[in-house]
Image: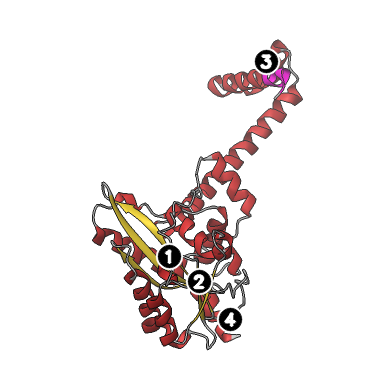
Amino acid sequence: MKRGELKAAIIFKLIQEIISKYNFKNMVSHLCKVAEVSRSGYYRYIESSKNRDVREQRDLQLKEAILKAFNHRGYKKGSRSIKMVLENEFNLIVNRKCIQKIMRKYNIKCPIRKANPYRRMMKATKEHTVVPNLLNRNFKQEVVGKVLLTDITYLPYGASCMAYLSTIKDASTNEILSYNLSNRLTLEIATKTIGKLIIQHKNLLHKDAFIHSDQGVHYTSPKFQKLLKEYNLGQSMSRRGNCWDNAPQESFFGHMKDEIDSKGFSTFEELQLLIDDYMEYYNNFRYQWGLKKLTPIQYRNQLLSA
């Protein structure tokens, strides 16, 4: 606002307060003349003031709806997720730019992606085998249970404790098919994840299903590779040091760590409950822009019924 406009606005506000306080409704012309401002300018100010009040009231109502979506089921969200939750859970269609404006206005901050803290484990010994990259970043093949991405991430908790989470993600639907939380970074964390996958989703797996991972020591292990063969699962690996070859899996860990606070839990059992709850939320209630604004389970069912 320019200096002259600001001065006029202050004068108009003073006139409005005098008229309101002393009920001098018939003295608008006189007060404007004394203050050396136009009467038409005063009425424009009053009209714009009413419009501001209406906009402010509307923004406050939107803020309440956005906050409900923002905290829906206990996990904070960005503008895209908020838009999808408003549409799917509250039957309310709001423009995403409008959501972003309200979030900025009322300082509603969405989770910010943090740098991936995953540290590469020790180098594989000579008997460990690296297999070719069959996937070549062709993640979205729209085939349920075929491209299965896996990785392990670190989850600090308590004062100085560390847990490790292994997951298997369907690249086409983004559904987490299997996961295993452990307080030890042994080979068993990866083999147990495969075992849970077979127990829980054997009938969902495609005949050409394969596991895609990085070249970590767990996945180059002869025991792990033998287990995959026993379950008729193929195997594919990212190129050495190339995180983009397994980007959707890395992305899942990044979003998860934005939305949960593992450090806030003092015991492994509490952390396990948190992870169980988050996986339930992610698969069934976390709408995703890239899945036609559906949840992973909804999108999987849509692909199967096509």
User: Which labelled disc corresponds to residue 124?
Assistant: 1
Q: Earlier in the sequence, mark 3 or mark 2?
A: 3
- Percent across and percent down for residue 40 are 76, 26
Q: How many marks?
A: 4
Say which mark, if any, is on residue 143: 4
Tell me the CA gap for discs 2 and 1: 9 Å
**Nearest to viewer (mark 1 / mark 3):** 1
Q: CA distance from mark 3 to mark 2?
A: 86 Å
Left or right of 157 in this view: 209: right
Q: Which mark is residue 31?
A: 3
* CB under 8 Å between discs 1 and 4: no
Check if mark 4's residue and mark 3's residue have beta carbons within 8 Å.
Answer: no
Is 282 magenta? The answer is no
Residue 150 image point, x, y percent: 46, 69
First along the sequence among labels 1 and 4? 1
Where is residue 270 drawn, in percent x and y?
26, 59
Label 2's element?
loop
Tell me the crowding category of disc 1: few under 14, some 14 to 19, or many 20 or more residues within 10 angstroms, Cα based: some
Amino acid tagged 1 = Ala
Q: Residues within 10 Å of mark 2 (few under 14, many from 20)?
A: many
Q: Are marks 2 and 1 in contact (CB under 8 Å)?
A: yes
Q: Which label sits on residue 130?
A: 2
Task: Name the amino acid type tagged 2.
Answer: Val
Of residue 24 and residue 75, the one placed in the foreground of this image is: 75
Label 4: state its secondary structure. loop
Q: Secondary structure at mark 3?
A: helix
Distance between mark 1 and mark 4 Cα atoms: 32 Å
Q: Quadrant of residue 306?
A: bottom right
Q: Earlier in the sequence, mark 1 or mark 3?
A: 3
Nearer the observer, 40 or 281: 281
Q: Earlier along the polypeptide chain: callout 2 or callout 1?
A: 1
Q: Which residues make up the magenta segment? A: 2-8
